[in-house]
Image: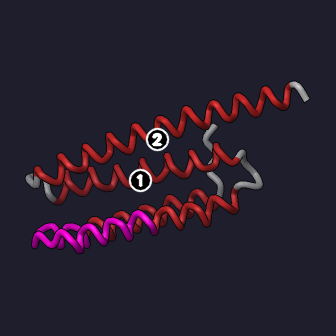
Amino acid sequence: MFYFSRNLVIFIVLTFIYSMTFNQVLEGHLLFKDWMRAAGISFLYFLVIIVTGAILSGKDRSKLLRSRCGFMYHLSAFVIVSSVRVVWLLLWHPFYRESNAASIAFALAWGVVLGIHFLVTRRREAKSENDDLFE
Protein backbone atom coordinates (compact mmCIF):
# COMPACT_ATOMS: atom_id res chain seq x y z
CA MET A 1 0.00 0.00 0.00
CA PHE A 2 1.31 3.42 -0.93
CA TYR A 3 1.15 5.67 2.12
CA PHE A 4 1.45 9.44 1.67
CA SER A 5 3.05 10.71 4.85
CA ARG A 6 3.39 14.42 5.51
CA ASN A 7 7.12 14.26 4.74
CA LEU A 8 6.51 12.39 1.48
CA VAL A 9 4.06 15.09 0.34
CA ILE A 10 6.64 17.77 1.22
CA PHE A 11 9.24 15.80 -0.78
CA ILE A 12 6.90 15.58 -3.78
CA VAL A 13 6.22 19.34 -3.73
CA LEU A 14 9.92 20.19 -3.35
CA THR A 15 10.88 17.76 -6.13
CA PHE A 16 8.34 19.42 -8.41
CA ILE A 17 9.77 22.88 -7.62
CA TYR A 18 13.34 21.63 -8.10
CA SER A 19 12.39 20.00 -11.41
CA MET A 20 10.71 23.09 -12.84
CA THR A 21 13.67 25.25 -11.83
CA PHE A 22 16.19 22.73 -13.14
CA ASN A 23 14.49 22.45 -16.54
CA GLN A 24 14.41 26.23 -16.91
CA VAL A 25 18.10 26.65 -16.02
CA LEU A 26 19.22 23.60 -18.00
CA GLU A 27 17.41 24.73 -21.13
CA GLY A 28 19.35 27.99 -21.13
CA HIS A 29 22.69 26.21 -20.89
CA LEU A 30 21.77 23.65 -23.54
CA LEU A 31 20.61 26.39 -25.89
CA PHE A 32 24.05 28.01 -25.76
CA LYS A 33 25.83 24.61 -25.79
CA ASP A 34 27.41 25.24 -22.39
CA TRP A 35 27.94 21.55 -21.66
CA MET A 36 30.13 21.84 -18.56
CA ARG A 37 27.68 24.05 -16.70
CA ALA A 38 24.78 21.87 -17.83
CA ALA A 39 26.56 18.81 -16.41
CA GLY A 40 27.34 20.65 -13.17
CA ILE A 41 23.77 21.82 -12.78
CA SER A 42 22.49 18.30 -13.49
CA PHE A 43 24.78 16.84 -10.82
CA LEU A 44 23.71 19.53 -8.31
CA TYR A 45 20.04 18.78 -9.09
CA PHE A 46 20.67 15.08 -8.47
CA LEU A 47 22.38 15.80 -5.13
CA VAL A 48 19.66 18.18 -3.95
CA ILE A 49 16.94 15.58 -4.59
CA ILE A 50 18.96 12.81 -2.89
CA VAL A 51 19.70 14.95 0.18
CA THR A 52 16.10 16.18 0.44
CA GLY A 53 14.82 12.61 0.18
CA ALA A 54 17.32 11.34 2.75
CA ILE A 55 16.43 14.03 5.27
CA LEU A 56 12.67 13.73 4.87
CA SER A 57 12.57 9.93 4.62
CA GLY A 58 14.71 9.66 7.73
CA LYS A 59 11.86 11.22 9.67
CA ASP A 60 9.34 8.70 8.25
CA ARG A 61 11.28 5.56 9.03
CA SER A 62 9.91 5.24 12.54
CA LYS A 63 6.45 4.64 11.04
CA LEU A 64 7.29 2.48 8.01
CA LEU A 65 9.52 -0.37 7.07
CA ARG A 66 12.84 1.14 6.01
CA SER A 67 13.04 -0.43 2.55
CA ARG A 68 9.42 0.40 1.71
CA CYS A 69 9.94 4.00 2.76
CA GLY A 70 13.01 4.31 0.53
CA PHE A 71 11.17 2.79 -2.41
CA MET A 72 8.21 5.19 -2.00
CA TYR A 73 10.54 8.20 -2.11
CA HIS A 74 12.40 6.72 -5.10
CA LEU A 75 9.13 6.06 -6.96
CA SER A 76 7.83 9.56 -6.16
CA ALA A 77 11.01 11.19 -7.44
CA PHE A 78 10.87 9.11 -10.64
CA VAL A 79 7.25 10.01 -11.37
CA ILE A 80 7.67 13.74 -10.65
CA VAL A 81 11.00 14.20 -12.46
CA SER A 82 9.94 12.19 -15.52
CA SER A 83 6.51 13.81 -15.72
CA VAL A 84 7.86 17.34 -15.44
CA ARG A 85 10.50 16.63 -18.10
CA VAL A 86 7.98 15.11 -20.52
CA VAL A 87 5.47 17.94 -20.06
CA TRP A 88 8.28 20.48 -20.34
CA LEU A 89 9.46 19.02 -23.63
CA LEU A 90 5.98 18.57 -25.10
CA LEU A 91 4.64 22.01 -24.19
CA TRP A 92 7.66 24.29 -24.43
CA HIS A 93 10.06 22.56 -26.79
CA PRO A 94 8.23 20.05 -29.01
CA PHE A 95 10.80 20.31 -31.82
CA TYR A 96 13.93 19.90 -29.71
CA ARG A 97 14.51 16.23 -30.63
CA GLU A 98 17.98 15.71 -29.12
CA SER A 99 16.66 16.47 -25.66
CA ASN A 100 13.66 14.17 -26.21
CA ALA A 101 15.85 11.17 -27.02
CA ALA A 102 18.15 11.80 -24.07
CA SER A 103 15.19 12.22 -21.72
CA ILE A 104 13.58 8.99 -22.89
CA ALA A 105 16.84 7.05 -22.51
CA PHE A 106 17.36 8.51 -19.03
CA ALA A 107 13.79 7.66 -17.96
CA LEU A 108 14.13 4.09 -19.26
CA ALA A 109 17.42 3.55 -17.44
CA TRP A 110 16.00 5.02 -14.24
CA GLY A 111 12.89 2.84 -14.67
CA VAL A 112 15.08 -0.28 -14.79
CA VAL A 113 16.86 0.81 -11.60
CA LEU A 114 13.48 1.51 -10.00
CA GLY A 115 12.27 -1.97 -10.99
CA ILE A 116 15.34 -3.52 -9.35
CA HIS A 117 14.69 -1.42 -6.24
CA PHE A 118 11.10 -2.71 -6.18
CA LEU A 119 12.21 -6.34 -6.43
CA VAL A 120 14.79 -5.89 -3.67
CA THR A 121 12.18 -4.20 -1.47
CA ARG A 122 9.69 -7.03 -2.02
CA ARG A 123 12.33 -9.64 -1.25
CA ARG A 124 13.31 -7.84 1.99
CA GLU A 125 9.69 -7.57 3.08
CA ALA A 126 9.05 -11.25 2.36
CA LYS A 127 12.18 -12.22 4.29
CA SER A 128 11.18 -9.96 7.17
CA GLU A 129 7.70 -11.52 7.30
CA ASN A 130 9.19 -15.04 7.28
CA ASP A 131 11.62 -14.14 10.06
CA ASP A 132 8.77 -12.73 12.16
CA LEU A 133 6.71 -15.85 11.50
CA PHE A 134 9.30 -18.18 13.00
CA GLU A 135 10.13 -16.09 16.08
* Of 110 and 92, the residue lying toward us: 110
> Would residue 111 appear left or right of 129 to someone viewing this image?
left
* Of 50 and 59, the residue lying toward us: 50
| Residue 98, magenta (yes or no) | no
Q: Which mark is residue 9?
A: none
Q: Position of residue 82 (x, y in %)?
A: 34, 50
* Label 2 to label 1: alpha-carbon separation: 14 Å
Q: Position of residue 79 (x, y in %)?
A: 42, 48
Main SS, magenta residues: helix
Badge 2 is on which residue? 114
| Label 2 Cα neighbours within 10 Å, binned few <14 / some 14-19 / many ≥20 | some
Name the front one of labels 2 and 1.
Answer: 2
Badge 1 is on which residue? 80
Q: Residue placed at 15% from the left, 67% from the top?
A: 30
Q: Quadrant of the C terminus?
A: top right
- The segment highlighted magenta reads 25-47
Q: Position of residue 66 (x, y in %)?
A: 69, 48
The relative height of residue 89 versus residue 118 in the rendered view (above or below) is below
Q: Residue placed at 10% from the left, 55% from the top?
A: 96
Q: Residue placed at 18% from the left, 72% from the top?
A: 29
In terms of sequence position, does the residue under pointer 2 or pointer 1 come before the other?
A: 1
The kind of residue tagged 2 is Leu
The kind of residue tagged 1 is Ile
